[in-house]
Each structure stands twice: as structure tokens, then as C-alpha cells.
């Protein structure tokens, strides 16, 4: 019985999370120097590129109950802008790890802390390198 309840809960969570990037119209990628001075590196508005990134972001495994303390500052910050969102944006602080995975901290409390497996993290890095003209160094 517990397994059935857990399965139903997980399905509802997955259904509830799907489509969360539906009206994404722009992603701004920011980097910071050692003094935490941020600068916008790129803005992504190309529909095909946004779709590729949306597909990757949908693979993040989120846990809103973790409040992590990271050992270093994030590698990049992504600001997601949505159509008809009344000016609201979603911010992801992203750490790319030596093992190939990526960790995320979301400004959305319902998401919280999340992670991507190596294959998806590599895809995201490759897209960002391509769009930035290799200006991003992970």
C-alpha cells in the first residue's frame, strides 16, 4: 500500500512539474568575477535554443526541502523570462561539478535545490558555449 501511495505521489509531482517552462521567451546568462561583480554574458531568444534548454531543465530533479550551503560561488546565473508573467522572472544559480553533474538553486521555493546528471549537464554546457561563442569557461 505504501508503494502505491508513493507511486501516485511521484506521478502527481511529475505531472505538476511538466510544462513549467511553457511560455519561456528569453534566458539571460550572467557570470561573476572573484569579487562577485555580475555581468550579463548572453541573452538567448532563439526559439530552437530555448526549446533545447527547456528540455534539459525539465530533467532537473528538485528537492524544495534542502537548503544547501555551497563551498564556492555559482559558475553562472540564468534568468528566465516568461511571456505573460507580469514581469516575474525565475533565477537559477548553477554550479558545474568536476564529476560532470550540475547543481541548481532556484528562486522558486517550490523547486529549491536541484541537480542534473552528467549527460544533461554536458548538453547544457555545450549549448551555452555555442551560443556565447565559447566565452563561457566551466
Image (cartoon, rainbow, N blue to C red):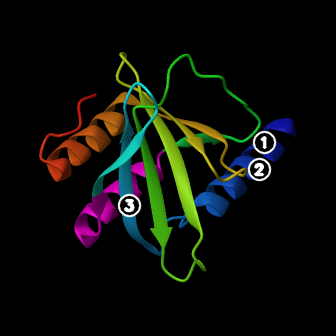
Q: Residue, x 66% and y 53% (percent of image)?
A: 108
Q: Nearer the viewer, mark 3 or mark 1?
A: 3
Whether 56 is among the magenta residues is yes
- Give residue 46's quadrant in the image: bottom left
Give coordinates of residue 43: x percent, y percent: 30, 61
Contact between labelled residues 3 and 2, with CB atoms less than 8 Å apart: no
Q: Residue, x 24% and y 67% (percent of image)?
A: 48
User: Label 1 vs label 2: CA separation?
Assistant: 5 Å
Q: Nearer the viewer, mark 2 or mark 3?
A: 3
Q: Is residue 121 above or below residue 15?
A: above
**Which residue lies most toward the bottom here?**
84
Q: Circle 3 sits on which residue?
A: 27
Q: Is residue 135 left or right of residue 72?
A: left
* Frontmost residue, 33 versus 123: 33
Query: Callout 2: helix, strand or loop?
Result: helix
Contact between labelled residues 2 and 1, with CB atoms less than 8 Å apart: yes
User: Label 2 vs label 3: CA separation?
Assistant: 31 Å
> What's the mark number on residue 6?
1
Contact between labelled residues 1 and 3, with CB atoms less than 8 Å apart: no
- Give residue 53's quadrant in the image: bottom left
Instruction: Looking at the image, tell me whether mark 3 or mark 1 is earlier in sequence order.
Output: 1
Q: Which residues are magenta?
A: 43-59
Give coordinates of residue 90: x percent, y percent: 56, 59
Give coordinates of residue 132: x percent, y percent: 19, 49
Q: Residue, x 55% and y 16% (percent of image)?
A: 71
Q: Circle 2 sits on which residue?
A: 9
> What's the mark number on residue 32?
none
Q: Residue, x 71% and y 57% (percent of image)?
A: 12
- Give residue 7's quadrant in the image: top right
Amino acid at each position: 500500500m505504501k508503494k502505491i501511495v508513493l507511486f501516485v505521489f511521484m506521478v502527481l509531482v511529475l505531472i505538476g512539474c511538466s510544462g513549467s517552462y511553457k511560455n519561456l521567451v528569453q534566458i539571460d546568462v550572467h557570470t561573476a568575477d572573484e569579487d562577485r561583480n555580475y555581468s550579463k554574458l548572453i541573452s538567448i531568444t532563439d526559439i530552437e535554443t530555448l526549446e533545447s534548454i527547456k528540455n534539459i531543465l525539465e530533467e532537473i530533479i528538485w528537492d524544495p526541502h534542502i537548503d544547501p550551503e555551497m563551498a564556492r560561488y555559482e559558475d553562472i546565473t540564468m534568468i528566465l523570462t516568461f511571456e505573460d508573467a507580469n514581469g516575474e522572472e525565475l533565477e537559477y544559480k548553477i554550479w558545474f561539478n568536476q564529476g560532470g553533474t550540475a547543481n541548481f538553486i532556484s528562486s522558486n521555493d517550490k523547486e529549491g535545490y536541484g541537480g542534473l546528471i552528467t549527460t544533461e549537464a554536458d548538453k547544457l554546457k555545450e549549448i551555452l558555449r555555442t551560443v556565447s561563442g565559447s566565452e563561457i569557461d566551466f
